[in-house]
Amino acid sequence: MAILSDDEKLETHKKNPVIKPDKNVYDRIFENSIRPKSFDSYIGQTTLKETLKISIEAAKKRNTTLDHVLFYGPPGLGKTTLAGIIAEELNTSVKITSAPSFERPRDIIGVLMSLKEGEVLFIDEIHRLNTVTEEILYPAMEDFYLDMMTGKTQTVKTMRIQLPKFTLVGATTKAGGISSPLRDRFGFVHRLQFYTIDELTQVILRTAKILNIEISTDSAKEIAKRSRGTPRIANRLLKRVGDFAIVKNNGKVDLNIAKDSLNTLKIDEYGLDETDRDMLKLIIEKYNGGPVGLDTIAAALGEDVRTIEDVCEPYLLQAGLLMRTPRGRKVSPEAYVHLGLGIFNEK
Ligand SMILES: Nc1ncnc2c1ncn2[C@@H]1O[C@H](COP(=O)(O)OP(=O)(O)O)[C@@H](O)[C@H]1O
Ligand SMILES: [Mg+2]
């Protein structure tokens, strides 16, 4: 693991405010220590878990590999964690990769050829695979072979190479971004749901135990409420609140400490941070509540469209503060109330 200079750490922090569910370097180190390793410690997503358990049992009984699985949903909901659990349940190991690292054909070929029989191959951000890589994957996923071209133009031959059988677990934040031939090759396509307050409270209590943070249930719930339905954020907030408690309250997290520290972090009761609030405010004040296009919003906020679309928007939609219309995004009456911006004027 790379050791960062203080300047680099600061940059990482600036780029990844506490509330954003995409990952930074700290998260990687921190998350691996608290990641559930079995279905029992994986909280929530009940239907998905039951379906997966049955498929895994069936594959084991039939002595075959598990069909390829695609997970989609916003960042931080537990997709990577599930890939690890699947491997664990199948008594095998997982190779963790990410689509942007497959640039040339030999990158994916190398990984496929290095797999062990029955192993799980995890490809994160799978909507970002290039066409060549995808085409190499098709026969590999379907019948576990590769067709390789050898020789010069006149003497070109295809050589069929048998691969070990494997299970591909793909993850994406955008189900719509995946080509249909690729999507069709997955036996299971599962959508991850945002977590309820109760589930997030359990996530927080579980993590607190692992990290030896003394915390009351009501404060865990307070943190849960402001975690945008996302375990990654819940864990990150817990850690911040825990730090706050060390300085202010001998490490004990009670409701006052929890509220104080969350307010200091400028996270409101909806779990919104300043970017979210700025986005809603912008639509209300500059565009009369919308509809307004995402590109316009992103440009006006000086944010990346992808961040707005993948990170801010899904939760604002889920929380009922933002609405999608054919002509762009619109804020809801609740957003006016939440921001204290007066009566909603339907135009
Ligand atoms: N169902 C869950 N139960 C407990 N902790 C979870 C759960 N889902 C995710 N987490 C925690 O949240 C963090 C982010 O999960 P991860 O699998 O990396 O999300 P994703 O891959 O969807 O972005 C992990 O460190 C894990 O500890
Ligand atoms: Mg992930």
Image (tube, rainbow, N blue to C red):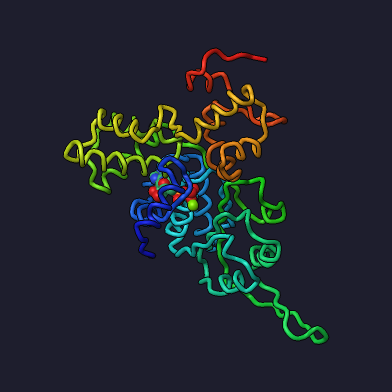
- Counting from the top left corner in percent of width and height, residue 49 is at 48, 45
Residue 320 seen anywhere in this rendered image of the structure = yes
> Which residue is more in the foreground, 69 or 344?
344
- Give whichever of 196, 92 is nearer the camera: 196
Query: Can residue 39 be seen in this snapshot?
Result: no
Q: Quadrant of residue 307?
A: top right
Q: Quadrant where the N terminus lies?
A: bottom left
Image quadrant in which you'd find residue 43:
top left
In the visual, does 147 lie left or right of 306? right
Compared across the picture, whether 213 is left or right of 306 comes to left
In this rendering, the answer to whether 33 lies above or below 50 is below
> Is 85 positioned to the left or the right of 138 in the image?
left
Q: Residue at x 55, y 12 (%)?
A: 343
Residue 203 position (above or below residue 334): below
Front-most of residues 179 and 43: 179
Q: Name the residue: 25% across, 32% down.
A: 257
Q: Position of residue 243 (x, y in %)?
A: 26, 43
Which residue is found at the position 80% from the left and 87% from the top?
155
Q: Give the residue displayed 62% in from the left and 40% down from the top.
A: 299
Q: Quadrant of residue 91?
A: bottom left
